[in-house]
DNA sequence: TGACTCATGTCAGAATTCTGACATACCTTG
DNA sequence: CAAGGTATGTCAGAATTCTGACATGAGTCA
């Protein structure tokens, strides 16, 4: 085990561990959201709108790490089901600012409770200092990976 | 900004940061693997086989965080194109141990070089101690999230 | 003013991944 | 030994997500 020195060695690869953790988190979130009939992207969209009302479709897409097109499909469904409202015309440009309806806010409440339990479980076993260290590490990774090829 | 105390607050959520980092890593890997005509799952499969020859389809699926069915589709393509070989009959049970062909090994070499550059870029700006801390943090998160509902 | 660039919303089709289901093989338990 | 439980490979269809493309609105610059 862990004999290969030339490769990337999955056992000691931070990238692999990152994917593993992310996968575990996603699975845990899906598990608690399924009883509420909500997907992770679905929840992410509502949570983003709760914290930053008026985000456009494209901004929501970036915040949820999906494409504009995917978020558009979701937003249309959320709008049709009365969780979200968008003006018929753009106040400026083409961007339509989306907002939660009372129904959307109510739906989000339960989901937030469920998701927070997952987040707490994930943080269990880590001291405050370790959590800070994790936070800094992830921020550093994200920063280093940004603009992979920003050459001339 | 960060005014909401009731929600999960994306700006301070380790879960959100985890997803962001994972997303950035995946994008960076896709970028360097695309010129080689290889997807991330494609690469993951080859890397797994290089480090643990004889893994079965199901084991590869778990290692690459996809379903058996998805990995099966990939494996059949890899076998058809001569990157991987599997015996016609299972030596024991139903599991077919897969192995890299010389061609598969050669293909993996270039990919590994590309992926390692991404991993190094991701680690840039972190001290050895910080890397260790990140490693421990991620391990802790994974452990805490395992077996969410293992109750009776 | 006019040409150019960039971001956005949206439609349509393709590609990928997943869920459901079935048959088979091993292992445990009584 | 028989029965139940678990794991595997695989097929088929559904659902999700992505890529490609187009038109529109706003800002930039000569």
Image (spheres, coloured by chain):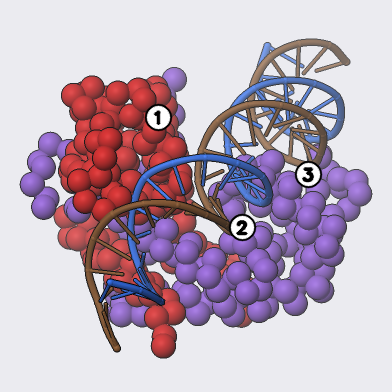
Chain colours: A red, B purple, C blue, D brown
Q: Which mark is residue B95?
A: 3
Which x, y percent locates residue C9?
37, 45
Q: Secondary structure at mark 3?
A: loop
Is A111 left, or right, of A68 in this rendering? left
Label 1 belongs to which residue?
Answer: A77
Which x, y percent locates residue B136?
35, 61
Rendered view: B112 above or below C11: below
Which x, y percent locates residue A129?
17, 60
Q: Which mark is residue B41?
A: 2
> Dot 1, crowdedness within 10 Å: few (<14), some or many (≥20)?
some
Pointer 3 and pointer 2 on the same chain? yes
> Dot 2, crowdedness within 10 Å: few (<14), some or many (≥20)?
some
| Residue visible at 26% across and 31% down in the picture | A85
| Residue visible at 88% across and 53% down in the picture | B87
| Between discs 3 and 2, the one toward the N terminus | 2
The quadrant in which residue A7 appears is bottom right
Q: CA distance from mark 1 to mark 2?
A: 30 Å
Chain assignment, label 1: A
Chain assignment, label 2: B
């Amino acid at each position: 085990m862990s004999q290969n020195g030339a490769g990337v060695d999955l056992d000691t690869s931070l990238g692999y561990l990152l994917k593993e953790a992310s996968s575990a988190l996603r699975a845990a979130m899906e598990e608690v959201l399924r009883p509420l009939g909500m997907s992770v992207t679905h929840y992410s969209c509502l949570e983003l709108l709760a914290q930053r009302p008026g985000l456009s479709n494209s901004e929501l897409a970036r915040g949820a790490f999906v494409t504009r097109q995917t978020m558009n499909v979701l937003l249309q469904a959320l709008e049709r089901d009365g969780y979200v409202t968008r003006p018929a015309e753009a106040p400026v440009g083409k961007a339509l600012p989306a907002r939660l309806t009372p129904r959307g806010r109510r739906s989000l409440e339960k989901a937030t409770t469920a998701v927070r339990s997952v987040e707490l479980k994930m943080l269990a076993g880590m001291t405050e200092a370790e959590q800070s260290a994790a936070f800094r590490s992830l921020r550093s990774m994200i920063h280093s990976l940004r603009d992979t090829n920003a050459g001339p």
